[in-house]
Image: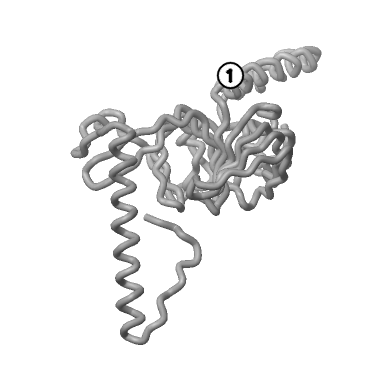
Amino acid sequence: MTMNYMPGTASLIEEIDKKLLVVLRDGRTLIGFLRSIDQFANLVLHKTIERIHVGKQYGDIPRGIFVVRGENVVLLGEIDLDNENKLPLQQVSIDEILEAQRTEQLAKQEEEKAKVKAMRERGLQPQPSGMQEEF
Amino acid sequence: MLPLSLLKTAQNHPMLVELKNGETYNGHLEACDNWMNIKLRDVICTSRDGDRFWRMPECYIRGSTIKYLRIPDEVIDMVKEDIVSKQRTKQQGTRGRGRGGPVHRGGFGSRGRGGPDKRGGRGGPR
C-alpha cells in the first residue's frame, strides 16, 4: 500500500480505518475512525466523539457518523491507542464540561470587552473579528 | 466508498448539516451533487446560538457553505450492503473473461477500503 512513485508524500489513504483526532477551524476536536476520503480531503468519520477541553478537564459527546468538508479541517493525527487512557487530564460528565465551557466563554467575552474598551480609550479602533475562528 | 457517494446513499435519511456560520439544518436529504450542494426536506433551522428556530418544507444549501454533515449510523450498514451487491453484479458481468478479471478486482474489493477509489483522483461517481 506504500507510495512507490512519490516517496515522502503525505497521503490520507494510510490513515483509513485508524482512530484519528481531527481539529476543525471552529476549534472543535473530533475523534473517530476514518472510513473514507477523497481528493478534497473530505472525511467520513465513524463512531465519532466530540471532545471538549476546558483547562485540565475534558468531556466526550458521542456523535455517530460525520462527513466533514475538507476545507474545514486544520489538522488530524493518529490516536495512540496504548496511551489514550493515560492522559494527564481529568474526564468529566457532559453536563459538567458544557457548564465549564460556558463559563470559559463568558470569561473570554468579558476579556474581549475590556480589550475593546481599552483600545477605544487610547484612540484606537477595535479590530472587527471577521470569521469567528475560535481556538 | 467516497464521501460524496456515501451522501448519495444517504438520500431520504434524516441528517444534520452545520454551516460555516454555525447554523444547523435538520432535515431529510432529498438530493445532492458533486459539489456537495444539497436539498433537504422538512427542515428545522437553528441559529448559531441555539435561540432561534425556523421551519421550512424544503431548502437548498450550497456545498461551499457546509462545515460538516452528521448522518445516522444505519447509513454505514447500508453502504456495506451496497458495496457487496455492486461487487456481485460486477463479478457476474466479468465472469466470461476467465481468471484474469475477477482476480484483479477481487484483490481491491475484498479489502473494502477507500484505496481503489483514490486511484483516479477525480472523485467521480462510481
Chain under callout 1 = B
Q: Nearer the viewer, residue A27 or B97?
A: A27
Q: In this view of the protein, can residue A41 be seen by the observer?
A: no
| Above or below, B103 relative to B50 | above
Q: In this view of the protein, can residue A119 be seen by the observer?
A: yes
Coordinates of residue B122 in the picture (x, y in percent): 68, 44
Coordinates of residue A42 in the picture (x, y in percent): 56, 43
Horizontal placement of B13 versus A5: left or right? right
Q: Nearer the viewer, residue B116 or A55?
A: A55
Q: Quadrant of the C terminus of chain B?
A: top right
| Above or below, A62 relative to A11 | above
Total tally of numbered discs in the picture: 1
Which residue shows up at 70% across the image and 27% down it? B12
| Above or below, B3 relative to A122 | above
Please name the amino acid that badge 1 sits on: Asp
Spot the residue most to the bottom.
Answer: A123
- Label 1, secondary structure: give it: helix
Q: Assess disc 1: are there few (<14), some (14-19) or many (≥20) residues with their C-alpha within 10 Å of its C-alpha.
A: few
Which residue shows up at 53% across the image and 39% down it? A43
Q: Nearer the viewer, residue B54 or A132?
A: B54
Horizontal placement of A13 versus A53: left or right? right
Q: Circle 1 is placed at which residue position?
A: B77
Q: Where on the picture, by quarter, is residue A115?
A: bottom left
Horizontal placement of B21 versus B120: left or right? left
Which residue shows up at 45% across the image and 52% down it? A26
Which residue shows up at 31% across the image and 59% down it? A108
Horizontal placement of B91 versus A41: left or right? right
